[in-house]
Amino acid sequence: MLSPVPPAPRVVKSWGEALAFVRERSTDLRGAEAGVERAGGRFRQALSVLLPNARTQVAVAQDLLNPSLAPGALPGAAGDGRTATQPAVTLTTTLTQSVVDLSAWRGLSSAREAEAGAVASLQDLRRRLVLGLAQTLVATVAAERTAEMNRVGLLRALERAALTLRSFELGASNQLDVVRVQQDVAVARGALVAGDEQLRRTREALGLALGFGDSLGVDPSFDLRGLVDDTRRDCAALENLDARADLVAARAQVAAARDSRRQASSGYLPTLGLSSTLLGLTTEPGFGRFSTWSVSAVLSLPLWEGGLREGRERAGLEKQAEAQLEDTRRDVSVEVARARRSVEVAESLVKTAVESRDLAERTDQLTRRAFEVGRGSSLELVQSGAALREAELNLVLREFQRVQAHLDAFLTEARCNG
């Protein structure tokens, strides 16, 4: 059991390598990027309503009741001295342009805000992916270190057991002393087994975070202390908390829902557009001619559409978006305050953990020396060993929590790109 856990099939050697894996293989990132593309498509669809719309139609037809006329053409359309061919080939080109359509402009504004919200959501996802990756890396390195410390603790427990057994053989201790140290060895073995399983689980979590279906470890040369500096190169601190991506996305969703509701209400207003139609047909003699070219202004006034544009559903969506914005604002406020406070707390916990470990180490040394000369009991020996193991593991945990606290404090108020 003193042999280390077998290394993972694949290891991460640097922060840059891990971040490259996330950018390349993250399905969440691909989904968010597709959401931005989808929102851009919706914006283009909303814009198309306000842009010119041109359409050309070619038809070949025969008028059975009036063979001398081209289908759809007025009498005389072929011109003087000409007749429409039988069958007639007609070319119709229509150009329409919206001039006044407030509902369409509201729809365009809503689509623009939705696209901005999708971009902000993508930025927030990148920040959360960086934060999650950093947390997973810290947890994996901490599990590696914990597994190593568990083996050191087991080795010390075995050494105390051997010392007690030797003392029992020499008649300086009794059977109870031997049982106590053996129980301590069993506890140390249990901690080792649990720590190894936790290490395997963190490796699996790291593999999933990097987009793999198997376990990934961390190379021993990985510089965990420089992790905060590495994240600062990929993310930038925000000057104002209101500029955090999730808040920007929530505000954009409120604006999009509001404009969508206004779009529904504006559907009752009249619209004004221009339309131009050019009609050509084949004639005999000659190849053909353009017979008519009309330009018209079209005023459309909606009267009743069965309540299609009441907008109540969109009003409900607006209220939901406003509630979501308020929830996000509260969550961000608490998250940032907690992250800022955690740095100071982590520093204090590391300081107390160092003092506790030093005292536990000194106590264990004195207890072992006293037991060797016959002045200490096996109970004191076991208790001092267990206290030292716990203090060392606690110090390791506090040191990694300090690194994590600095990462959280920075990334909760940062923007990550690319």
Image (cartoon, rainbow, N blue to C red):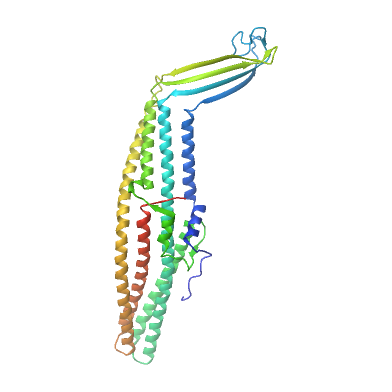
Q: Position of residue 332 (x, y in %)?
A: 33, 50
Q: Quadrant of residue 395?
A: bottom left
Residue that lies at the very extreme toward the top in this rendered image = 81
Q: Is residue 379 visible?
A: no
Q: In the depicted view, which residue is nearer to us: 174 or 303?
A: 303
**322 relative to 177, above or below:** above
Q: Position of residue 131 (x, y in %)?
A: 41, 56
Left/right placement of residue 76 relative to residue 386 reads right
Q: Quadrant of residue 259?
A: top left
Q: In the depicted view, which residue is nearer to us: 238 or 307?
A: 238
Q: Position of residue 407 (x, y in %)?
A: 38, 59
**418 relative to 319, above or below:** below
Q: Residue at x 33, y 43 (%)?
A: 325
Q: How many marks?
A: 0
**30 relative to 258, above or below:** below
**231 relative to 252, above or below:** below
Q: In the depicted view, which residue is nearer to us: 366 or 414?
A: 414
Q: Position of residue 257 (x, y in %)?
A: 37, 35
Q: Is residue 57 visible?
A: yes
Residue that lies at the very extreme toward the bottom in this rendered image = 170
Left/right placement of residue 57 relative to residue 44 reads right
